[in-house]
Image (cartoon, rainbow, N blue to C red):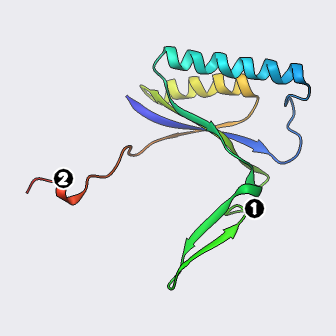
């Protein structure tokens, strides 16, 4: 089983189709809950979350002397990651199918990326010589 990152992108300002009223927000949340329940039932859901906007971002960079921290995103962009799912899928086609379901539930564009590697790197003491 492979793992994929499904990144949900948000745009600055009002997003077309975004919930505006309490009733629309309830319908939106019901769609997301139903999607996550389906992912759970199928063993697809690994982890997911919503993140704060770019104004809550801090970037840490290395320098010759010390670490430098700056407020704000690494790059200026009109779109930013608003949330994500990590899913299990047999292949890219299955991951893309789930991404389509996320689009239907959220009305946001979804970027799909396969993981090259998952888990922790083995420490040198774990290797057998």
Residue 104 falls in image quadrant: top right
Above-or-below relation of 42 to 94: above
User: What's the distance in space between the residues labelled 1 and 2, CA to CA?
Assistant: 42 Å
Q: Are marks 1 and 2 in contact (CB under 8 Å)?
A: no
Mark 2 Cα shell of 10 Å, populated few (<14), some (14-19), many (≥20): few
Figure label count: 2
Which residue, given by chain and number where applicable, does mark 1 sit on? Answer: 76
Above-or-below relation of 86 to 62: above
Quadrant into which the N terminus falls: top left
Q: Does label 1 or label 2 sit earlier along the sequence? A: 1
Secondary structure beneath dot 1 equals: loop
Q: Please tell me the numbered disc located at residue 126.
A: 2
Mark 1 Cα shell of 10 Å, populated few (<14), some (14-19), many (≥20): few
Above-or-below relation of 46 to 129: above
Q: Which residue lies furthest to the left in this view?
A: 129
Q: Residue furthest bottom?
A: 65
**Residue name at image x 84 percent, y 31 percent:** 18
Residue 42 placed where, x, y %?
A: 48, 15
Q: Nearer the viewer, mark 1 or mark 2?
A: 2
**Residue name at image x 36 percent, y 44 percent:** 119
**Residue name at image x 74 percent, y 22 percent:** 29
Residue 55 placed where, x, y %?
A: 77, 57
Residue 2 placed where, x, y %?
A: 40, 32
Residue closer to the observer: 106 or 67: 67
């Amino acid at each position: 089983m492979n793992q994929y990152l499904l990144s949900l992108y948000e745009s600055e300002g009002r997003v077309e189709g975004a919930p505006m009223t309490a009733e629309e927000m309830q319908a939106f949340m019901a769609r997301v809950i139903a999607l996550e329940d389906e992912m759970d039932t199928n063993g697809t859901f690994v982890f997911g979350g919503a993140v704060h906007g770019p104004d809550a971002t801090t970037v840490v960079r290395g320098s010759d002397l010390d670490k430098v921290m700056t407020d704000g995103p690494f790059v200026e962009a009109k779109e930013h990651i608003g949330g994500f799912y990590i899913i299990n899928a047999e292949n890219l086609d299955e991951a893309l199918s789930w991404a389509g379901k996320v689009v239907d539930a959220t009305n946001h564009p979804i970027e799909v990326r396969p993981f090259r590697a998952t888990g922790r790197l083995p420490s040198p003491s774990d290797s057998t010589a």
